[in-house]
Amino acid sequence: MNRSLVPVLGVLAVLLIAIAFVNPNFVDPPVFLAFLKRAAPLALLAAGQYFVIASGEFDLSVGSLITAEVVIAARLINGDADATWWVIVLLLVIGALTGLVNGTITTRFGVPSFIATLGMLLILEGAVFLWTDGAPRGALSDEFRMFGRNNVVGQIPWSVVILLLLGVGAVLLMRSDFGRTLMATGDNARAAALAGVRVSWVRTTAFILSGLSAAVAAVLLGGFGGVSAQVGRGMEFAAITAVVLGGVALGGGRGSVVGAMAGALTVESLFTLLNLLGVSGALEYAVQGLIIIAAVAFTSRRTDEHPRPGRGIRRGRAHHSVLK
Amino acid sequence: MGGGSTKAESPSEFFDQAEYDRQLAMRSKQPVGPADKPWEQAIEPQMVDTAKYKKDGPYNFCFSNASVDNPWRQVGWKTMQAEVKLHPEIAKFTALDAEAKDDKQISDMAELGSQGCSVLIVSPNTTATLSPAVEQACKTGVPVVVFDRGVRTDCPVTFINPIGGYAFGADAAEFITGKVKEGGKVLALRILPGVDVLENRWAAAKLAFDKSKLNVVGVEFTDGDPAKTKSIVSDYLQRHGKLDGVWMDAGATSVAAIEAFEDAGQPVPPITGEDQQDYLRKWKDAKLTAFSATYPTYQWRTPVIAGLKILAGQEVPKQWKLPQPTITSDNIDQYLLPGMPPLHYALCGCKDMPGYPQNWGGTS
């Protein structure tokens, strides 16, 4: 097992136990599944964000992309069940295209991804506002909302099944050639390029995966809560918090997608616990800020202790193995 | 634990006993004016003379709008534009949107000052910050009409709004205390803290709940986000097993709260909301025990009417208090409007206006 997973799984376990302590019902399968259902969109978004961060970039556009997707879906479906399927396909296409644009601007035009995706965030937010006049129109069909709201069979929610399937898919993807080139790119883009990796394309693919994850998260969130013009607000930071909490190093090349998704569950359990304790609202942002800073500090401290191979400083590791 | 119920401050900071008493009394007063046009009615009007503003048309109406960033303001803004079109003597209508920024609204008002306005209508973004700007505008001699949120100056010719937040909060809370049996667990859901009309709604509700034998198990802020609302209600259902009533200070997330009960397989307890179509439809379809307090969007018609009266030299109420109806299972049918979008507000007073329903996003 990947050692970088230990801290996040430890924190997650502590939080889950604390929740169960405050709310003994939490261990009931339906209640726990409801928790997973609520966490699924963030976990998928964190997986998407993981690809981008592992490749050495950021994607800040996913929050407003989610809002745009939900608002577009409501307007186009307008309560008509027959429109559900092509609209879902369209949402995935929009997600992928947004990722493609983010990736192209970052890799071809040399705009740092922080700025490129921040720009995309503002563009999407403004476009949604202009298009809706601030009040979303239309309605989602029950068929669309099924994925975020209903159960497949018995007590098993659609969201949890989708999370599991896509989570396994993400793990397999990271074990494939793509995963290796992605890590190599994030670790040292120049070395990867010299080794024949098409760095631009790898990064662009990571942005496309992030855009797709936002599209799926939009389907789940829209299904869960219904139409809202603020559904995705703050989701980009929640996803980045989840990823760094999952032991993924900003700057790329380190950490696992399982860690990122575990980080999302940890963020969601923390919010659940705070809410159960009667601490909520504005404090969530403060807590999120603290987590980001603390997690990044922790990860970079670990990185200093165990310098990564390929960044030129191999002494630490050599020294370490001598001690063993 | 259960800290939710202690989070709400005692109503003192936003509580004005005299205003509270006045609003609660106003609820049972008969308004003056045509019954089929509540936007022209006024409760206990104290008329002021406007002869000095009398002026021949055509007129240039100016409007400094706080924002159009929520469905309530969208419906209201469309209604006001339709009202302007009803009056050919308004030759020009200049409106500036402050985009919910105080500083922008202050400069908007300064700019309107140089536009030769016949009348200036203001819907202030915030009370405290915009008061000096309104005073400045009054000094130019142009009649000023303020509506919706108030200002701390009585220089405007008239201030138009419905009865108010205390009445809203009390109406909804009295429904809950009337329907939920003693000791029942009630959850109060609020959008956000610190806005006076919303604080007033909660202050009045809290008083009603304190007097009752109900157990308010929590007071939570939803940020107007349906997903968050649903999560909060689900958490309370887990923590307390069940809830016997839900009081809400705004209707935008009422449906999300209802869905949380449905998804948990629990009966929906008595719940309150506003006059949005999605909520009314859910209420009707699921045969809920429900109630709506309202903050009618038809108040956006009144400033235009007031402006024309002032320019005609007719007297207007200094404080133009509009009626604030409530929706119950007995009268819900008149507010359910098939073909209107989910976030349309039934009390727009716009049904007979040209362009209805298309201009309000509806289909006939």
Image (cartoon, coloured by chain):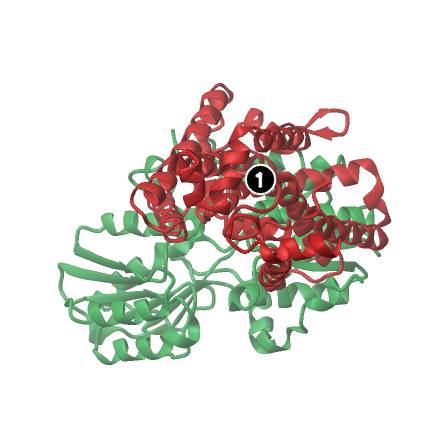
Chain colours: A red, B green
Seen as rendered, the residue at the extreme front is A322
| Depth order, front residue of A174/A189 | A189
Q: Quadrant of the N terminus of chain A?
A: top right
Is residue A41 visible in the rendered image? The answer is yes
Residue type at mark 1: give it. Answer: Ala
Asked where in the image residue B267 lies, by quadrant, the reply is top right
Q: Residue at x 51, y 56 (%)?
A: B324
Depicted B97 relative to depicted B358: above or below: below
Left or right of B133? Residue B257 is right
Left or right of A304? Residue B334 is left
Q: Residue at x 43, y 32 (%)?
A: A96
Q: Residue at x 54, y 69 (%)?
A: B194
Left or right of A324? Residue A125 is left
Mark 1 Cα-neighbour bin, 10 Å: few <14, some 14–19, many ≥20? many
Image spot of residue B10 (x, y percent): 68, 74
Image spot of residue B171 (x, y percent): 62, 57
Depicted A257 relative to depicted A151: above or below: below
Image spot of residue B193 (x, y percent): 57, 65
Image spot of residue B293 (x, y percent): 57, 53
| Depth order, front residue of B248/A130 | A130
Residue beneath disc 1: A47
Depicted B127 relative to depicted A178: above or below: below
Is residue B190 visible in the rendered image? The answer is no
Asked where in the image residue B187 lies, by quadrant, the reply is bottom right
Badge 1: chain ID: A
